[in-house]
Each structure stands twice: as C-alpha cells, then as structure tokens.
Amino acid sequence: MHPHAQPHRPAAAPAWRVPDWQEAEDFVRLFHTEQPEQPVPFGTRLRQIRESLDHTGTYRHTHAELEFGARVAWRNASRCIGRLYWKSLRVLDRRAALTGAEIHGHLLDHLRLATNEGRIRPLISVFAPATPHRPAPRVWNAQLIRYAGYRAADGSPVGDQAHTAFTDVVRRMGWQAPGGWFDVLPLVVQTHGDKPQLFDVPRDLVLEVPIEHPEEPRFAALGLRWHALPAISNMRLSIGGIDYPLAPFNGWYMGTEIGARNLVDPDRYNLLPVVAGLLGLDTSRESTLWRDRALVELNLAVLHSFERAGVKISDHHTESHRFLTHLAREEAQGRVVPADWSWIVPPVSGGLTPVYHRYYDEADLRPNFYLDDEARALAEGRCPVAH
C-alpha cells in the first residue's frame, strides 16, 4: 500500500440519489413473483420499505433481495452474451466493509474465490450503497486486474495503451512501476472521509496464461500472456432504486475478448502486425486479408493456451449457441431479453454465428449495471471535479 498523492483534481464520491418508490415497488414485486416463498409477505415488505424511505430517505435490501437483484442485473445486461448461467452467480454481501483496508481484503478474496485455480466461478462482491449521510466506496480501476501502459523514451508504446493515463495517475500517487509489458496495476480504493489509497494486487492471486500456438512454435517467443479473470469493477449496480457503485463482478472470458480486442485493438496491444510478420504474411495490401488470417491464428492461440493451462474459457461459436438457448428459456418464461446486437455479435466471424442473423429487443430493464461518466473518467485517468 502506498500513501496518496493528490491528482490534479479531487474525485467526487459516488453521490446518493433519492430511491425512486416505483423502482423499489417494481423490484419487490418482481422478487416476490419469481421467489414467492418468502418469510415476509409482499404487502408487509412494501410497507417496511415505504416507512424506511419516509423516515430515513433510503432502505436496506435483505440478503435474499440483494442476491436476487444482482443475478437479475446480470440477466438484464444487454451487452453480455454469457447470460445463460445467470442463476449460478454467487453473491458476496460486503456492505459492512467501510475502510480501504477492509475493502481491499474483500477484493483479494474475490480474486481468490472467482479464479478458483482456473475453474472460474461467476461471482459478485456487493459493497455499501450510497446513503443520505455517507457516500459509497468505489474502486477507480475499470477491472480488478489490468495491465499498465507506458511510453518508452523513444515514444514507442509498452504495455496496454488503454491504461497509459491511469498508469500515470497511480505513479504520481506513489506506485513504483516496473515498466514491463504485463505489469498488474494497483487498485485505487476511495472511501468516505479518506483520500484515495493505493493497494497492490499480490502476484500469487493473478493467474496468468502464457500464449502459445498449437502449430507455430515461434509464437511462444513473443512472450504474450493474459490474466484468467475478467472482473469488472467500475459499473454501478442498481437494484430497486438503490445504487451500489462498488460491486465488482466476473464471469469467464470468451476468447475473442482477448484475441480480437485486448491484444489487437490499435489503442491496446496492437499485435496484428507483429503476428502477421511472425507468420510471414504479405502485408503490402489489404486484399491479402493478412489481418483476418493473423486474427484467426491469434484467437486460436488464446483458446489453445487457456485450454492447455486448464483455465476456463469459451469460444465465440459455443457462446453464441448458449446465448440462443438463454433466449429461448427466457422467452418461455414470458420474459423480455434485452440485447445490444453490436455487442452480442462476436468480433470474429460474426456472420458464421447464429446470433448474427436476428434482431433483439432493446430495453433498459432493472435491476441492471451502468457505467457512469464519472467512473469512466477515473478509469481513463481523468479525475472529475468534485461537486
């Protein structure tokens, strides 16, 4: 852990908003409709919430409500293709943790439990919500595990270029940056009454997979690797009008997230030219389809490497069929399945997957997850002005 050195501008704490009564009522009605065997009847629970809102300006979810709300938020996440297993989401109630050290400890527990030695488990850790008297805690990082980004002395990129600005922020806060291609960034935890604090992520909690190709041995010489756990940490969980700005959650990776985005996007690792060169492809013109050929081989390497290491991952064809299974199950229950076509269709061979050839409902159903402008700014290394 390092002491905080103030960035250019102080970051605003996640603000409290008055819980909307209609949202609260709709959520409790949904909860009791889908899980009717509850110790407190629906009408009684509504009266409890109404009284709490009138006297305190907020209300507290029971553990059962929190668990149900987090799972349904995953079910309603329109940009996620992997929702078939929404009922299996394990929910950890961390609302009692208020200090930076407590929160950091629970975040490390999340990494340990979710990674599960490669047998990735869907998991969410829900921390305290904002209240009229106390802002909610939060983590500035977009994910619990991300790699740093730098610029070498000659201006050439090193590491994940999406996180160069954030890396600069944590270096000003005291982080001793190793300067490598795959340096795990520290966590920035912000709690009420304290300055944001840096906490290191122990390397033994970060399971990483070396990337090798099943047929091209020169691939290993690139020294590529990726972490096993995609744990999003800057999205606000909204349940029944209550906001939980710190609710990190994870599933497991779909291969294209790594092989077609993280390692490929020009503002990330931009490795397609490197892979094309290694494979001896003709890059003199686009019509050779060198980008497509390099992309497929890189994605093959990612899937092969994770499977060889015993780390759970899925390919985009399998996941597309699973999503249609989820769609059919939900429609059989009479439920709408919101989906953003541009996110559901994989970034590799989209037209070869069944999710490409249909339309989807676009709806903002709640509970749900939201990425606020302020959280996005912090993850990008831009500190918003406190209001």
Image (cartoon, helix red, strand yellow):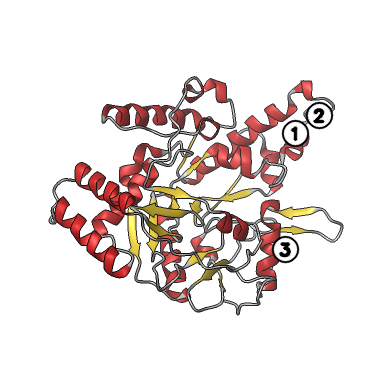
Quarter of the rendering occupied by the N terminus? bottom right
Q: Is 361 placed above or below 187 here?
A: above
Q: Is residue 344 left or right of residue 272?
A: left
Q: Which residue is labeled 2 in the image?
A: 283
Which labelled disc corresponds to residue 179?
A: 3
What residue is rendered at 77% in x and 22% in y? 288
Marks 3 and 1: in contact by CB < 8 Å? no
Q: Is 240 placed above or below 308 here?
A: below
Q: Amino acid at mark 3?
A: Gly
Q: Which residue is labeled 1 in the image?
A: 276
Is residue 190 among what the camera can see? yes
Where residue 143 appears, as percent x and y from the top left, is 54, 56
Mark 3, Cα crowd under 10 Å, few <14 / some 14-19 / many 20+, is some
Frontmost residue, 114 versus 354: 354
* Helix, strand or loop for disc 2: loop
What residue is rendered at 50% in x and 34% in y? 340
Q: Residue furthest right?
A: 154
Frontmost residue, 379 versus 176: 379
Q: How many marks?
A: 3
Marks 1 and 2: in contact by CB < 8 Å? yes
Q: Amino acid at mark 1?
A: Ala
Frontmost residue, 55 versus 167: 55
Distance (Cα) linking label 2 and label 1: 7 Å
Q: Is 285 placed above or below 22 here?
A: above
Q: Amino acid at mark 2?
A: Thr
Where residue 196 appears, as percent x and y from the top left, is 56, 73
Where residue 55 appears, as percent x and y from the top left, is 27, 69
Where residue 227 appears, as percent x and y from the top left, is 55, 52
What residue is rendered at 47% in x and 75% in y? 192
